[in-house]
């Protein structure tokens, strides 16, 4: 890994300090002058910005402007983003507003193309790269995926014994430490996935091209080969390889195969069945060891040709997802164990054990809501907190199933009781996975720490790479952890924007009513967050609950009317009225419907 990456981040901030920055606005004509009205609140005091006359943009358009000068009031349009009432354009604006570049510097694009040509002429793996092109291999990804980091091969050996090959794109062959591509990948830290778009960590010629394990095409990989006896890894090997995927599965298709509704292609039917069995054994052992049981659903949005949100569906974790998840976890653990045993500097994925106070608070929160909790002493010892939260997570998952999927606010309580996972040069274990050694190795196309782990692993097994410098890893861990948090914030905000646009359109076209049954999924002193309809969310301000003053209890699970004694609890049913939708900002304001359930 190059030590130059962190300095690049400082240079970028310094440039903004010198008086130049970018913002998003809507062009408007004011007399003879053109101005940009900030599209997102809080920028430049919310006032208009005078725009220099130019060829780009016309009134009503959504634009990116470069603001110069210490007063920040004179700007030049540098890019037209589209229309403010089009969801895809508003999401694009959000990405620019949050500092994403939306393109690569010309020098980086050129370097990426040259890297592909260089590797084609001279494979860094050389004669040591194993030829696995004859091994039946497949990928399982979302239907919309374009970058395929990982592929699987598997065979049954009899007596509950299986051999699994996890093939990961050999990004390190193309992205050399200290190169222009490497510095830009470090600056980005991670790919950012929003509805209908992606801000990739690597240029497309790599992410969707040479490094993507597409079917029927020879690709360079780093393979983790594991022999499993049940769920126990009894032997492992690591090496550079050459692979060719035989089949590109999506999750829905694999679920149909598992349900007996469709047959797998003959060439990969046996390997798919063996992978399913290996994953099931790994899952059972992980659950028995006390790994967290957290059920969640991620939205997947579809757009029409004009860029409007056409539909949204919740992506639920099914068995097909679990096959990939548990095999990837096993590979990540195997790599982390080897690097730890050989004392090779790397970035671990750590999830430190929760504090006893967090476990005690979670039990108090669940008890206040009438949800069953695991037995626990009055004062939780440090070593017991993780196990108590894991048991509580299983009881919460069972409660949600009992309620036919309602009560997702309870899952949020479990998640907030945990420390946030992060990257670290020190192996501190992963409490959520109940793993003593874990790293991110399986997605080097979209996460920089995975690329660090590839270089570390290949240096450890004689794969021709230099080990990362230990002196650079503290800063790299902090930087990439921060970039991950930034990406998650952008992704959540973009989901909110897409949902709000979909809701506004459905209301306008009369596809849904303004009144809905919902459930409280979160509380703050100012009101309640409510999920309603088919995947929508909004905020019910306490000021709209007329006739009382509302106070939040100490553990944040119940709002109580001071005079009436009525309550609003997390997971309560409530019938709401949609009052206002603000799509560009992803906000929905609610009221209690007149004939709905009032607070109890």
Image (spheres, helix red, strand yellow):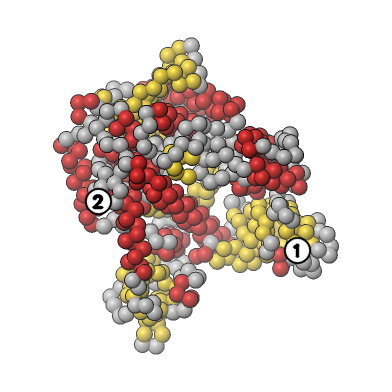
Residue at 25% in and 51% down: 180
Label 2: few (<14), some or many (≥20) within 10 Å? some
> With respect to residue 135, does 173 lie above or below?
below
Q: Is residue 211 left or right of residue 320?
A: left
Label 1: few (<14), some or many (≥20) within 10 Å? many
Residue at 59% in and 51% down: 535
Q: Position of residue 303 (x, y in %)?
A: 45, 54
Quarter holding the C terminus is: bottom right
Residue most toward the top?
A: 159
Q: Please tell me in which quadrant of the rendered image residue 79 appears.
A: bottom left
Residue at 30% in and 80% down: 53
The residue at which mark 2 appears reads as 180
Residue most toward the right?
A: 564
Label whose residue precedes the other's in the sequence (2 or 1): 2
Q: Position of residue 522 (x, y in %)?
A: 66, 54
Q: State the mark number for residue 333.
A: none
**Mark 2 to mark 1 CA distance (whole Å):** 56 Å
Quarter holding the N terminus is: top left
Q: Please tell me in which quadrant of the rendered image residue 581 appears.
A: bottom right
Q: Nearer the viewer, residue 595 or 346?
A: 346
Residue most toward the bottom?
A: 31
**In the rendered picture of this protein, how many numbered marks are placed on residues?**
2
Q: State the mark number for residue 550.
A: 1
């Amino acid at each position: 890994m190059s030590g130059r990456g962190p300095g690049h981040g400082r240079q970028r901030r310094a440039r903004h300090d010198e008086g130049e920055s970018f913002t998003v606005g809507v062009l408007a004509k004011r007399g003879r002058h053109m101005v940009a009205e900030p599209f997102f609140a809080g920028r430049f005091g919310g006032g208009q910005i005078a725009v220099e006359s130019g060829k780009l943009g016309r009134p009503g358009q959504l634009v990116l402007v470069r603001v110069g000068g210490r007063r920040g009031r004179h700007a030049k349009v540098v890019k037209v983003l589209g229309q403010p009432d089009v969801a895809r354009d508003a999401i694009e604006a959000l990405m620019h507003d949050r500092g994403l570049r939306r393109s690569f510097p010309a020098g980086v694009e050129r370097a990426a193309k040259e890297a592909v040509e260089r590797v084609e002429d001279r494979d860094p793996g050389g004669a040591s790269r194993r030829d696995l092109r004859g091994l039946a291999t497949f990928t399982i990804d979302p239907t919309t995926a374009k970058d395929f980091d990982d592929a699987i091969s598997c065979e049954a050996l009899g007596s509950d014994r299986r051999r699994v090959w996890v093939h990961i794109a050999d990004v390190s062959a193309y992205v050399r430490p200290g190169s222009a591509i490497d510095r830009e990948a470090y600056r980005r830290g991670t790919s950012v996935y929003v509805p209908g778009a992606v801000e990739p960590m690597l240029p497309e010629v790599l992410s969707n091209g040479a490094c993507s394990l597409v079917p029927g095409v020879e690709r360079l990989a780093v393979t983790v080969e594991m022999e499993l006896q049940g769920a126990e890894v009894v032997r492992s090997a690591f090496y550079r390889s050459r692979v060719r995927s035989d089949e590109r599965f999506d999750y829905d298709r694999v679920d149909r195969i598992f349900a007996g509704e469709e047959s797998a292609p003959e060439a990969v039917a046996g390997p798919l069945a063996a992978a399913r069995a290996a994953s099931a054994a790994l899952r059972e052992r992980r659950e028995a060891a006390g790994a967290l049981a957290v059920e969640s659903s991620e939205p997947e949005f579809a757009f029409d040709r004009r860029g409007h949100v056409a539909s949204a569906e919740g992506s639920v974790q099914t068995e097909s997802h679990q096959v990939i998840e548990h095999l990837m976890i096993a590979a990540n653990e195997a790599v982390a164990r080897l690097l730890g045993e050989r004392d090779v500097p790397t970035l671990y994925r750590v999830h430190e054990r929760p504090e006893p106070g967090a476990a005690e608070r979670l039990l108090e929160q669940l008890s206040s809501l009438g949800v069953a909790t695991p037995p626990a002493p009055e004062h939780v010892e440090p070593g017991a907190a993780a196990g108590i939260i894991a048991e509580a997570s299983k009881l919460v998952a069972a409660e949600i199933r009992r309620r036919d999927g309602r009560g997702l606010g309870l899952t949020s309580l479990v998640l907030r009781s945990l420390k946030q996972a992060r990257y670290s040069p020190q192996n501190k274990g992963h409490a959520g996975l109940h793993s003593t050694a874990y790293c991110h190795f399986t997605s080097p196309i979209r996460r920089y720490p995975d690329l660090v782990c590839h270089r570390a692993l290949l240096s450890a097994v004689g794969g021709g790479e230099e080990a990362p410098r230990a002196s650079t890893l503290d800063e790299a861990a902090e930087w990439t952890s921060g970039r991950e948090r930034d990406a998650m914030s952008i992704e959540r905000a973009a989901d909110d924007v897409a949902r709000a646009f979909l809701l506004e359109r459905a209301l306008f076209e009369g596809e849904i009513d303004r009144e809905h049954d919902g459930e409280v999924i979160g509380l703050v002193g100012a009101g309640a967050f409510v999920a309603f309809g088919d995947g929508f969310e909004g905020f019910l301000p306490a000021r709209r609950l007329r006739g009382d003053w509302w106070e939040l209890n100490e553990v944040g699970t119940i709002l109580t009317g001071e005079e009436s004694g009525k309550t609003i609890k997390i997971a309560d049913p409530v019938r709401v009225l949609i009052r206002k939708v603000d799509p560009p900002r992803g906000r929905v304001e609610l009221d209690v419907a007149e004939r709905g359930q009032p607070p109890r």
